[in-house]
Image (spheres, helix red, strand yellow):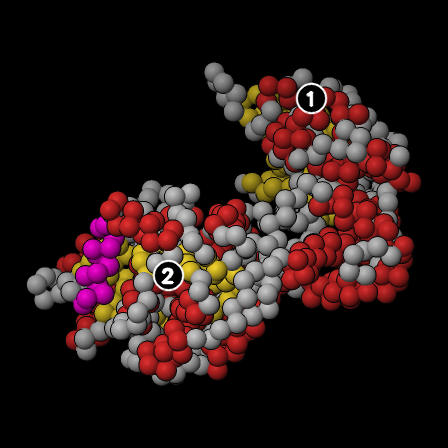
Amino acid sequence: MEQNLLQTKIAYLKGVGPKKAEILQKELGVFTYQDMLNQFPFRYIDRSQIQKVANINDDTVYYQLIGTISNLQLIGKPRATRATARFSDDSGSIEIVFFRGLKWIKDRFKPGVRYVLFGKASEFNHNFNFVHPEIEEYNPNDPLIGEGLQGVYNSTERLRDNGLGPRTIAKLQKLVLQQVWDFIPETLPKYLLEQENLIPRKYAYYQIHLPSNNIEIQQATRRLKFEEHFFFQLKLLRNKMHREQTVKSHVFEVVGDYFNEFYQHHLPFPLTNAQKRVIKEIRRDLASGHQMNRLLQGDVGSGKTIVALMVMLLALDNGFQACLMAPTEILANQHFATIKEMLEGMNVNFALLTGSTKIGERRKIYAELADGTMQIVIGTHALIESKVVFKNLGLAIIDEQHRFGVEQRAKFYEKAALPPHTLVMTATPIPRTLAMTQYGDLDVSKIDELPPGRKPVQTYHLYSDDRYRIMVFMKQQIALGRQIYVVYPCIKESEKTDMIALQAGYEALLRDFPEPQYKLCVCHGQLSAEDKDWEMQRFITKNAQIMVATTVIEVGVNVPNASVMIIENANRFGLSQLHQLRGRVGRGADQSYCILVTDHKLTNDGKMRMKTMCSSNDGFVIAEADLELRGPGETGGTRQSGQIEMMIGDLQKDGELIPHVREAAINLLADDPKLIKPENRMLREHYKELFAQTFDWSQIG
């Protein structure tokens, strides 16, 4: 009964019908009564007061008026572009303006009929008017007039044009609640409600849609946020438990000749304590008999590649193959060059496989991977193509893993008899709340220490009119034998922005740094892979002192001699991206510098980003600031495939709640790992309902 009523199609709700139901489905994803209840208000307005036209004097507040409409005119010939009318009550009249829905607006308002107008006043030429206010016939028995707080719901132009504005949606919510109130099931056990001081679920739905006061809104919001985060954490933690208990993988018992020879004779510099700790954590996973699924976080320049290589050598010591997959050819080439240098003199058969690998070389790599003579392969998504067959893949390492979809990474499972151990790496520090949600089913290791001898990059914010000072500084650094990156946010001048384009900047730099005294190279996304590599090699081999680039050099470029990073229009980048770009310098022993160049027109967020970059080199501090400024949707780059969308939970705002919820979920699973106790019956049923349609990617990092 409960299930059937909540799953009633929204078309059957009074005032909806088939046409409006189709629009609700397409615009908001609302198919059922339950879907409608899960459309939560994003703010509340006070509808208890009726104001007078004569008292309108503020363009920052909402007004509710009752009156009549006259003098409706369509303006613009031959085709109307707007409609105007007068709204009048016994104190005066005010203009109302419409720019949309003009076809039907001329027939909508009738003379002598009283209407309720609700909207924010606009001031224009010292007069107030209303642009696209909500208007409907006045009904003294209207349940929403005089009720006080009313939720404001997300709407779209198409919804509004079809009579489904925020106010109508508020009315529909009340109708749904009246019908399903007695059938809204509880999902959390009584002991948890008491322990966490949470109100029952049905009251939470009522209070969030039809609150009497702000306290009720707070109670309802906390209950519904807790529930959403709680079930998400249960899913992540149960996935992790399942993997640890049932997903078997190869046991790497041996620490043998490959690992020991490298550690004793080829290590380019002593490992930091953080690197040693991480390697121990990984070794413990590899020897457990269960599949490793670990996330390795490490700030730019922290030495993740050397950890990855040592773990791959452990795979070789145990008779298995290993692979390292990167999201771009530039990054794959960089890993290959670094590993080639570190393995010099060791008897290890390894190769690079990308889209640019020649056919003959590609066939040779395929054959040697299949017969097991190729021990390590480094590459791009070319590694997961069906033609790539491993004899005994034991370890898969994925770098900058947020740039791959979960399904792509899952393809490594098809290439081994048992799931290979998986290590996913990122140089993008992940805020704590995101780590608990997006990566909550992984074990997490963190390299939070830079190699000895590295000096923090000194960061400065300068303005466009400081360009002469910047040029003098660049020439001083080049005279010392250093190299310089100059990064632009775009390639060609855009009519829609005031950015200095890469092409124009490159031409200006050629005038300031003329050949043959200076050499410049260019790298951007519109170059072919071959041309990018050629330009990059000119910089790496010191045949060019200045590299003019877009963000293609954000990850994977390792030139220790480069000591200056100049970022033009730095306010166009997010904090995490600025930090990634800054990480391209400071990789050698010399003092390095990052110069953020902007014009004087900066938003408050832009000023805060510049201030944060100049005051901190800690990627984890910057990641938290980035989450606060930009929100979770943008922080980590490309959204992960399969990521769950929150209905009311907010990773940005729920930073204090999420760790608390996770702890509650851990405690519940410790007491009832299979959710079979009678007191958890409702929780178990809701869990099954929530995740019945979700494909379980939990074993993939």
Amino acid type for the residue under numbered disc 2:
Gln
Residue 78 against residue 328 in the figure, above or below: above
Q: 588 left or right of 240? A: left
Q: Position of residue 185 (x, y in %)?
A: 86, 45
Q: Position of residue 686 (x, y in %)?
A: 79, 47
Main secondary structure of the magenta stretch: helix
Disc 1, SS: helix
Residue 147 against residue 434 in the figure, above or below: above
**CA–CA distance in space, label 1 to label 2:** 61 Å
Mark seen at residue 375: 2
Count the numbered circles shown.
Answer: 2
Q: Residue at x 51, y 58 (%)?
A: 420
Q: Residue at x 38, y 57 (%)?
A: 372
Residues drawn in magenta = 527-542
Amino acid type for the residue under numbered disc 1:
Lys
Say whether disc 1 or disc 2 marks the residue closer to the N-terminus.
1
Q: Which residue is mark 1?
A: 19
Front residue of 164 and 430 = 430
